[in-house]
């Protein structure tokens, strides 16, 4: 799966399952720091990443500093 596909699936999951609004999010927008998602939602994203992409991200790496934007999340997923 390429980076564009990962970004599209991750964006769709966050918008449809977590934010549940007609908003859109920019690739570099702070999703957590912007108040669109909380720490419990970040755990849901962590589970989605593991199920959808087969990438296990250890809990210590699931922080606001490292997973606040789509760009950060996609980069971490692509890293494997």
Image: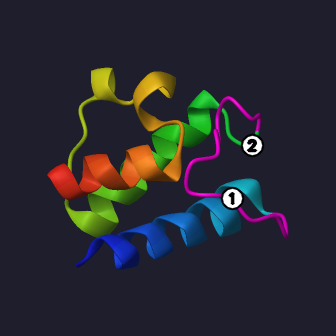
Q: Tell whether 27 sits left or right of 54.
A: right
Q: Nearer the viewer, residue 52 or 28?
A: 28
Looking at the image, which residue is at 78% across and 63% down? 20
User: Residue 15, image x and y in percent?
Assistant: 68, 64
Which of the two discs, 2 and 1, labels the residue nearer the N terminus?
A: 1
Q: Along the horizontal axis of the image, is 69 left or right of 25? A: left
On residue 25, which mark appears?
A: 1
**Disc 2 packing (10 Å; few <14; some 14–19; many ≥20):** some
Q: Which residue is mark 2?
A: 36
Quick one: which residue is furthest to the right in this view? Answer: 22
Quick check: 27 above or below 65? below
Say which quarter of the image contains residue 66. Answer: top left
Residue 25 in magenta stretch: yes
Mark 2–mark 1 CB contact (< 8 Å):
yes
Magenta residues, dominant SS class: loop
Q: Compared with residue 32, is residue 46 higher up or lower down, i.e. above or below?
A: below
Q: Residues within 10 Å of mark 1 (few under 14, many from 20)?
A: some
Q: In what element is the residue under mark 1?
A: loop
Mark count: 2
Q: Which residues are magenta?
A: 21-35
Residue at far left of view: 80
* Gap between marks 2 and 1 measured at Cα: 9 Å
Position of residue 5 measured from the top left corner of the image (x, y, whole percent): 37, 79
- The residue shown at (47%, 39%) is 43
| Residue positioned 41% across, 44% down in the render | 72
Task: Name the image quarter holding the N terminus.
Answer: bottom left
In front: 52, or 31?
Answer: 31
């Amino acid at each position: 799966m390429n980076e564009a596909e990962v970004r599209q699936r991750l964006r769709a999951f966050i918008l449809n399952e977590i934010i549940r609004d007609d908003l859109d999010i920019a690739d570099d927008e702070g999703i957590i720091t912007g108040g669109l998602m909380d720490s419990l939602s970040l755990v849901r994203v962590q589970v989605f990443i593991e199920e959808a992409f087969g990438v296990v991200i250890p809990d210590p790496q699931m922080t606001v500093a490292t997973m606040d934007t789509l760009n950060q999340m996609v980069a971490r997923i692509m890293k494997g």
